[in-house]
Image (tube, coloured by chain):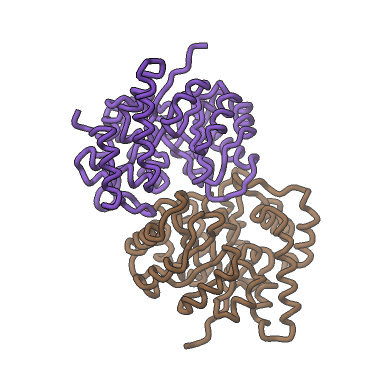
Chain colours: A purple, B brown
Amino acid sequence: MTPRKIELFVPVITPFASDLSVDTARYVTHAQALLVGGAHGLAPFGTTSEANSLSVTERMAALEALIAGGIDPAQLIPGTGCCAAPDTIALSAHAMQLGCRGVLMLPPFFYKGVSDEGVFDAYAQVIEAVGPNLRVYLYHIPQMSGVPITLPLIKRLITRFGDQIAGLKDSSGSWENTAAVIAAFPQIDTYSASESRIPENVAAGGAGCISASSNVNPRGIRALIDGLNGTDHDALHRQVCAVREIFESMPLVPSIKRTIAVQRGDENFGRVRPPFVAVGQDHADAIARAVHLAGSQGQS
Amino acid sequence: MTPRKIELFVPVITPFASDLSVDTARYVTHAQALLVGGAHGLAPFGTTSEANSLSVTERMAALEALIAGGIDPAQLIPGTGCCAAPDTIALSAHAMQLGCRGVLMLPPFFYKGVSDEGVFDAYAQVIEAVGPNLRVYLYHIPQMSGVPITLPLIKRLITRFGDQIAGLKDSSGSWENTAAVIAAFPQIDTYSASESRIPENVAAGGAGCISASSNVNPRGIRALIDGLNGTDHDALHRQVCAVREIFESMPLVPSIKRTIAVQRGDENFGRVRPPFVAVGQDHADAIARAVHLAGSQGQS
């Protein structure tokens, strides 16, 4: 078995124009800069991307714009999980037709307290509809979805669909859960949602991270991944943790977008769709600190 | 002020064909029977309708089918609240163009812990986009949506949009909350989600109920509403409570659909979309009891 490649995927924020339509030009510019900044790939349409605030049509157009902008679809794992199976199927088929590496798939998330059997049925319905070329990265974010991806569910999906189950992003915040998934299913790529966990993730056999704050600190996180076995390890880890921690006291997505606006000197990046509210001046000091630590973007 | 009309709106279940497409013929048949059975109107595309498991296109087609089936759009309050504002706007505009009485609108429900300000912005964005003819019934179901419709939020919406805020369905299960909404906002129509609360709802100044189990017991609930001031009041209330309580020990939507299948002698009504799982034989006795108490449907 070849050693697993350790990677950083960025759940790219979605910039909006003043009428709250998707600002495609800024979207592609930011996405390209993240790759130049060291990201191995992008996971557009995640929680940080306000994915569920976008229509199916908007997501398809935005994905096409990334590829038209020269980004290799093999570097893309777009989020496609919606509440309605027809939407999830349409987005997943579209992504695979474009040549994406796979899709990051939320379970249907309106109903709470549903059984593992029901969630299995939901994934199975999509995988069978899209076909054998689909590669699914399961998205475990119970604090938002209300629908956990449990270990028995993962086992059942792998048993049925084999290597069509390509990985899992663990956004639960529980390292114990991440470690349990990596230990039980070493054949899939398991990503942590915080760069602060990269050392443990990699040591345990995980695949790296897909992190909200990689939108503002791609260089720092890439440096940590590249330096995991080097003498600068501790300093690199301290840097990513210091940036990450700043966002823990603020509304995550609005403050990430506001930081990018400051990094790029372009207020337009700060806009959010409801139900988010843009971050105001009350967080200006924290955001200035993040920019100081992570550096600017788009100028270098 | 004229006395408020007390009404039963049914969140119509959505029947599915064997390929899980919407079974339009059975949908219209069941909807028509509910009105014949005494419902004042229908609230299609609620939680019981598996609304969020349907695409925008499917919801529009199903609503058009109800109206083509002879149902007066003035009796319809379809659910239109999605996570993505473009979807909510499209569904709400479509419903009002068809002449519906209003729309029952969930807040965007993926993100949890959002502020009242953000939820206000979400409703305002939709109301402003659809225009002054829109009538919104707010949908408070925090145990599913994770996003409560608080009293300060209702106040702010009414202050800004006046009678465009037409009502609220309280599915929280908290009578204290329903009573507080009715007391604070007597100008809107506030519906309970359980027929067991109709007496308190009406006594407090509420507008009636929008109840899952009215799919199986429309006659009993209508009889209670018509008999609120009569000598049979207690017996009528006991009947609706007895039916309602049966479903409290089963997965609600699958067991409601299974009961309708038995009432109609048509297995097709029992199908559900994932993440729900159809109810099996283990609940057959409970469902037989519900049918015994509520009577059959579609034959009388």
Task: Identify whether B247 is placed above or below A184.
Answer: below
**Where does the image place residue B35, in percent across and percent down from the top left?**
61, 70
Q: Image point 77% across, 67% down: which residue?
A: B293
* Residue positioned most to the bottom: B1
Total labels: the figure holds 0
**Where does the image place residue B75, in percent across and percent down from the top left?**
52, 71
Residue in the foreground of this view, choosing between B24 and B275: B275
**Where does the image place residue B255, in percent across and percent down from the top left?**
69, 55
What is the quadrant of the C terminus of chain A in the image? top left
Task: Identify whether B15 is placed above or below B186.
Answer: above
Residue in the foreground of this view, choosing between A23 and B160: B160
In terms of image quadrants, where is residue A259?
top left
**Where does the image place residue A82, in percent across and percent down from the top left?**
48, 44
Does residue B204 appear left or right of residue A237 in this picture? Answer: right
Q: Image point 35% across, 19% down: which residue?
A: A232
Task: Identify whether A203 is placed above or below A271.
Answer: above
Q: Is residue A73 visible?
A: no
In terms of image quadrants, where is residue B250?
bottom right
